[in-house]
Image (cartoon, rainbow, N blue to C red):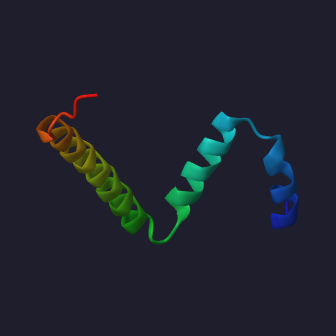
Amino acid sequence: MSAAEIIQEIPKLSLAELRYLAARIVEMEPGRETLKKCDQLATQTTRLLGRLEERNARRAPRVSD
């Protein structure tokens, strides 16, 4: 099957199938360890930013209406 034929079939896939396909493509990527590390760092950063926003929200002075 050619790449063009595969691409034509992609819109027919379910969301679960698309996610599976994307995961498999990343697994086959030569730089997959780099991609995995980047994903881990992005997740950690997002969690840290969420905690900082929560802390800042608790410290912010309340403005009365």
Q: Nearer the viewer, residue 61 or 38?
A: 61
- In the image shown, does 29 or 18 lie closer to the viewer? 18
Q: Quadrant of the C terminus?
A: top left
Who's the residue at 64% across and 48% down the image?
Answer: 21
In the rendered image, residue 36, in percent from the top left (x then y), is placed at: 38, 58
Find residue 22 and report its horizontal and vertical position in percent: 60, 51
Total count of labels: 0
Q: Is residue 60 left or right of residue 18?
A: left
The front one of 28 and 45 is: 45
Specify whether 56 is left or right of 16: left
How far across and down, in percent of the image, does residue 23 sit? 55, 50
Residue shown at 54% from the left, 62% from the top: 28
Q: Quadrant of residue 56?
A: top left
Q: Is residue 45 left or right of residue 58?
A: right
Q: Quadrant of residue 2?
A: bottom right
Where the N terminus falls, by quadrant?
A: bottom right
Residue that protrudes farthest toward the bottom in the picture: 30
- Residue 51, position in %: x, y? 20, 42
State whether residue 2 is above or below residue 40.
below
